Amino acid sequence: MRILQFGRTGQVATAVQAAARGRAEIVALSRAECDLERPEAVRAAILAADCDLVLNTAAFTQVDPAEARPDEAFAVNAIAPGEMARACAERGLPFAHLSTDAVFDGLTDRAYVETDEPRPINVYGRSKLAGEQAVLAHPRSVVLRISWVFSRYGRNYVSFMLRLARERELLKVVADQFGTPTDGEVLADFLIATAPRWAAAPAGDPAFGLFHFANAGEASRFDFARAAIDRDPLTRARLEATTQAAFAEPAPRPPRSPLDTGKLRAVFGFEPEPWRVAVERTADRLVKGGLAG
Ligand SMILES: NC(=O)c1ccc[n+]([C@@H]2O[C@H](COP(=O)([O-])OP(=O)(O)OC[C@H]3O[C@@H](n4cnc5c(N)ncnc54)[C@H](OP(=O)(O)O)[C@@H]3O)[C@@H](O)[C@H]2O)c1
């Protein structure tokens, strides 16, 4: 199995490369090798590739800076993935892409399903939604919406909170924002395990289309942080609950955006773990590794 992957240094990109060892060959393109702001470079990379699947892990993921840089966010999150899907269609290649719970407004009393109407409330969410739509126009494409991704790799909430909790006496954490944490290493394993199925599946196969991928259950940001830092014997900080409003960030966040994974279970037989089990395992591994990396 050969996979052409856009993104090399990001959290999910790194987790996929780790999961692929001994199972699949990944050619991962960094920003220097292929800048997603240059659609012609994206297209050329796919037209030249010798691969069975194209996977996009790269994105403009900085939610607050995106408010002031919408052109960049749309170039990377919408135009580039659309170009990838088009080039894949020309080559007859399947295409896997990642999206986000931030396509929803967060005004819900239940977990979101794939058929719920997206209504993004910030530039990042709008750009990711435009990307999904461009990608799903290609029949052999799959979009996995994920949320609150954590792992041993890259910048993420679990590693960030563990470090901060060693440095500070007091940590104020938002307690009125709810979602489903997603284990990025389990996601990476799923992507590698499912790659042969996508590579073999014809257009119209149920393995293509839009899916929600997340751990089971729902957490507040506060619960999420608490579950991680409680695993570290060197934690100094006391956690204090605060509100989203108190942070006054440039981009509004959906207050509640848990993802329902019933479709994932029905099509792939994938059973998500409870989020707390996965967060604790990741925190233990990070603590054991000295919070390096
Ligand atoms: N992390 C989350 O909590 C979360 C939640 C929901 C959805 N997602 C989605 O999951 C996917 C992976 O996210 P992640 O957590 O792995 O993000 P990440 O750690 O921020 O990595 C993003 C990657 O995209 C690359 N990139 C950004 N702009 C680029 C450009 N113009 N050209 C080429 N590469 C560019 C970055 O390269 P540099 O290192 O050079 O900047 C980086 O490698 C994204 O689609 C994201 O929208 C993530």
Image: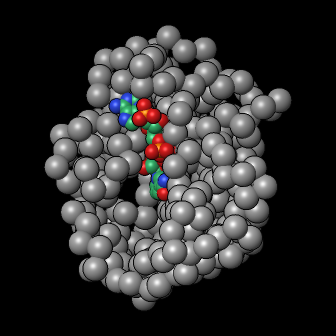
Is residue 143 visible in the rendered structure shown here?
no
- Quarter of the rendered structure image containing ligand 1: top left
Residue at figure coordinates x 19%, y 44% from the top left: 69
In the displayed structure, does residue 86 sit left or right of residue 150? left
Image quadrant occupied by the C terminus: top right
Quarter of the image where one finds residue 137:
top left
Q: Residue furthest bottom?
A: 109
Q: Residue furthest right?
A: 22
The location of residue 261, given as percent across then percent down, is 60, 69
Residue at figure coordinates x 16%, y 49% from the top left: 68
Q: Is residue 9 above or below residue 266?
A: above
The location of residue 275, given as percent across then percent down, is 66, 72
Quarter of the image where one finds residue 49:
top right
Image quadrant occupied by the N terminus: top right
In the displayed structure, does residue 193 sit left or right of residue 172? right
The location of residue 154, given as percent across then percent down, is 56, 45
